[in-house]
Amino acid sequence: MQVIDSHVHFWDLGLGNQPWLLNPQPNLLGDYSPMACDYGPDALRSESRMSVAGQAIELVGAVHIEADAVDPIKETRWLAGLDDPLPSALVVGVDLSQADAVEQLETQLTLSDRVRGIRQILNVHANPLFDYVGRHYMSESTWRDNFRHLARLGLSFDLQIYPSQMAQAAELADANPEVQFLLNHAGMYVDRQGVAGWRAWRDGMRELAARDNVATKLSGFGMLDHQWTAGSIRPLILEAIDAFGVERCLFASNFPVDSLYASYDDTWRAYAEIVAEASATEKQALFVDNAQRLYRLSLATPTS
């Protein structure tokens, strides 16, 4: 069973670029102090030595997503300097609200031919434990003006938001039809009390799915459901696949963040169990082909 892990994070704490790991603060992750250690391609490979339903897992690619580095340029330089085929692609960090954001985008592209897109976390929430950024970037004119350069530069956008932000994100996707959006963590179903929270998430997912340039990652479930099981995440995964279609969904681990809640083995085993009734072609799309297409990966290992 081949897998492209479309959402992983690497870091070298000796670079001093992720101080948030060394000074844990209360947030939705819970106690994340176990992550305060170096994590790179070899660590990911060691996680992936497993089997699912009797099939060995072959990690044929991985996409690095920016890891809240103090200096995103420094992060990309470090990743570009790794003598390793992983990560297969880089989604780098750029703050589009900054006056020199376009210059940063162009600089990032010069650092590695694996740069495929950017991520800037946008999560805003009334609960301080869930609020990441404290400002509504998608409403800011400078941010939106700089966002328009992504299409010119051939960069995708990893979209990390909550359901309450999905309507505005859909409008952003409409305004930038040439940009490929990749919704992180199945839209982060955060407000889980009562039917209203489910409906808000479901309706928001449907609104985003109506935009052909939006796809969704099926990942990160442990961040908002620390005791998740295959049964608890099944409705989310099946609803997301129903909304977006198999061709616009891709599985990912969100490791090492989600290692706080489950092993790599258990994570991929649950995914395989949930889509066990899918056809071989559909599974190939969910686990490999969609990630390869959407992130434009050139893989050394054949995928078929």
Image (cartoon, rainbow, N blue to C red):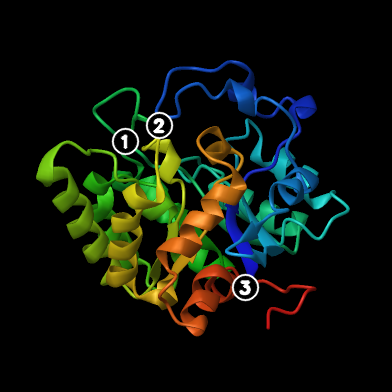
Mark 3: few/some/many CA within 10 Å (<14, 14-19, 20+): few
Residue that numbered label 1 is attached to: 124
**SS category of the residue bearing label 1:** loop
- Residue 58 position in % (x across, y down): 71, 65
Q: Quadrant of the C terminus?
A: bottom right
The CA span between labels 1 and 2 is 6 Å
- Residue 245 position in % (x across, y down): 35, 75
Residue 77 lies left or right of residue 169; in this view the side is: right
Observer-nearest residue: 224 or 27? 224
Identify which residue is drawn at 55% across, 69% down.
Answer: 287
State which quadrant residue 116 falls in.
bottom right
Q: Quadrant of the N terminus?
A: bottom right
Mark 1: few/some/many CA within 10 Å (<14, 14-19, 20+): many
Amino acid on which the number 3 mark rests in the picture: Arg
Amino acid on which the number 1 mark rests in the picture: Val
The CA span between labels 3 and 1 is 30 Å
**What numbered label is drawn on residue 132?**
2
Residue 52 lies left or right of residue 41; in this view the side is: left
Disc 3 vs disc 1: Cβ atoms closer than 8 Å? no
User: Which residue lies most toward the front here?
Assistant: 54
Observer-nearest residue: 176 or 246? 246
Instruction: State whether residue 175 appears in this view.
Output: no
Residue 116 lies left or right of residue 130; in this view the side is: right
Counting residues from the N terminus, which is met first, the one under dot 1 or under dot 2?
A: 1
Observer-nearest residue: 243 or 272? 272
Amino acid on which the number 2 mark rests in the picture: Tyr
Against 257, residue 154 (above or below) is below
Counting residues from the N terminus, which is met first, the one under dot 2 or under dot 3?
A: 2
Disc 1 vs disc 2: Cβ atoms closer than 8 Å? yes
